[in-house]
Amino acid sequence: MSLVLVLFSVIGFSQQKISSTNQFSIDFDNETLYAVSLDQISSLPSKSIGDISTVNHKGEVKGGRQNVKGVLLKDLLGKVNLGLSKPKDLFKYYFVLEASDNYKAVLSYNEIFDTDNIYVITESDGVVIQKSKDRIEILSLSRLGQGHIYIKGLMKLELKAAD
């Protein structure tokens, strides 16, 4: 009987399959401000990122990508009017990035807009975003070798204010 319970608990709590996405929404105050499509991402100039090894929080290599190219997330978000005008107010905002498997990661407004480290991947291993099985992907280069933020199947980017 205990073997069956263990098996059920392993099956019940296993990670969901990551579905590729063709667009993601940018939400604020429970409203969708904008939907970003693959074509819109592809229309922006890509930067060469090079070869990347993805690692977990322990520094263990979990995979790698060659000839990675991407668009800075801040360049993409810069096309959207978020309605934030006072620079002082920006410090209290953060983004919750949600993938198709319900995985979530949090980035501060300043992490995105004050660095050139967070990319939407447009090509890797010779495969363009439209043909990638992991689309839409977000990669933060700020913590390489320490377990960086890497999201596959991005479906929503929600702007929230800290209390």
Image (cartoon, rainbow, N blue to C red):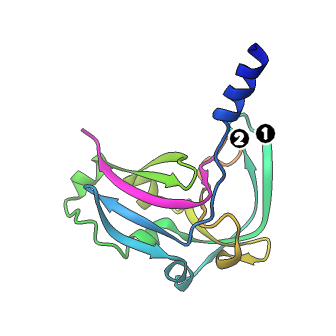
| Residue annotated with mark 1 | 60
Instruction: Name the disc covering residue 56, or none.
Output: 2
Pointer 2: residues within 10 angstroms few (<14), some, or many (20+)? some
146 magenta-colored: no
Residue 121 in percent (x, y) is at: 62, 68
User: Is residue 121 in sight in this rendering?
Assistant: yes
**Image quadrant of residue 134?**
bottom right
Q: Nearer the viewer, residue 123 or 4?
A: 4
Task: Kindly identify the amino acid type of the residue bearing the numbered disc 2.
Answer: Asn
Is 110 left, or right, of 57 in this rendering?
A: left
Is 120 left, or right, of 125 in this rendering?
A: left
Give the residue drawn at x 22%, y 66%: 83
Magenta range: 148-163
**Image quadrant of residue 45?**
bottom right
Q: Nearer the viewer, residue 10 or 34?
A: 10
Give the residue drawn at x 45%, y 74%: 36
SS state under label 2: loop
